[in-house]
Amino acid sequence: MSAPPSLLGVQIEPVSAWLTANIAGAVAPFSFELIAGGRSNLTYRVTGADGARFVLRRPPLGHVLATAHDMAREHRVIAAVGRTDVPVPAALGLCTDVHVNGAPFYVMGFVDGVVLDGVDSAEQLPQHLRTPAAEHLIDVLADLHAVDVDAVGLGDFARREGYIERQLKRWSTQWESSKTRELAAVDEVAERLRADVPLQRGVSIAHGDYRFGNCLTDVVQGRISAVLDWELCTLGDPLADVGYLGVYWFDGDVGNVRSNDPTPAGGFPTYAAMLERYATRTGRDLGGIDYYVAFSCWRLAVISEGVYARYLHGAMGDQGVDIEQYKVGVDALAERALAAVRRR
């Protein structure tokens, strides 16, 4: 069967020509499949005539925060991190010529594994492997935070200091530009966070969206095969990633369950145990982690509102998604952040 002339977000003919010319081992014709679950950058599985598989990433189709969808930036990160022991897909090629596909895109290697993005997917990971997989998840994060940014060529990737201040400014601006309604909780949390910014201790590669749902897990070995979705990566406070993981870790409160969190399935260690393992491995003091959990809930509320707004305007394509879940999720995250920050 011949490939269609286009797919939402992919111009088949020019992209195929680019792949043949720029990706070693890529054999036309190619089939392209939008990978379900993409909520920001659009991600496609590409299969060559010989069965070889690749992954193509491009920005959303609508107007979005520019730096959050910089393909060259994301490609640079995985190429740099790929020089370390942190598991990432191979960075295979970057296209910055917008005439090829209407926007920049990059291609990375295909990695087998399961995205544990909910209770149902967690059933693919045997009970006896859930603790080892979780421990490897936090170990990989600790290894990422130990990477020498200068040694891997990321020393000038972003400002090193003032991470929380920069993030508060960035996402407050994003809230104002993408909000679809007024939410007093979002504004109150931002004000409280700005008034109580902790001292940044050290600088690391900060993934920005680190959780099981953004990793491929080897469900046979109980290990992380690859860390994905580096679009929010920057340099900054490593504790922000640790706090963010807490947003996606079941703490026994059913009101805080995220639909794309696998840990309510049971068999996973507690968040406290994850913190202890990270602290032991890195020597970092996690006494103030609640601030970072509150900050992460607030930031995720802002990001989710942006995704909701893009779906409303058709920028994410027709993926058959119930977009009302994003609106409800924003409200819940804002209230969770407010409750957390008021406890400080």
Image (tube, rainbow, N blue to C red):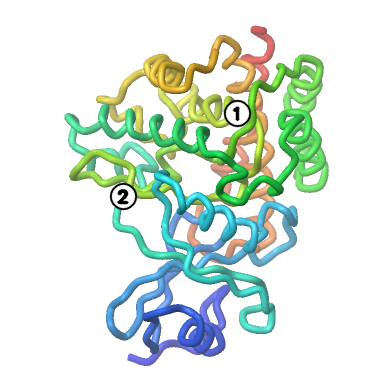
Q: Are marks 1 and 2 in contact (CB under 8 Å)?
A: no
Q: Neighbour class for label 1 at 10 Å: few (<14), some, many (≥20)? A: many
Write down the quadrant of residue 165 in the picture. Answer: top right
What type is the residue that disc 1 sits on? Ala
At x 41% / y 88%, what residue is drawn?
Answer: 3
The residue under label 1 is 240
Please state if 146 lies on the left or on the right of 179 as rendered: left
x and y percentages locating residue 327 in the rendered image: 62, 40
Report if residue 166 is visible in the image: yes
Q: Nearer the viewer, mark 1 or mark 2?
A: 1
Report if residue 335 is visible in the image: no
Q: Secondary structure at mark 2?
A: loop
At x 52% / y 33%, what residue is drawn?
Answer: 145
Task: Please tell me the numbered disc located at residue 114.
Answer: 2
x and y percentages locating residue 59 in the rendered image: 62, 63
Q: Residue furthest front?
A: 151
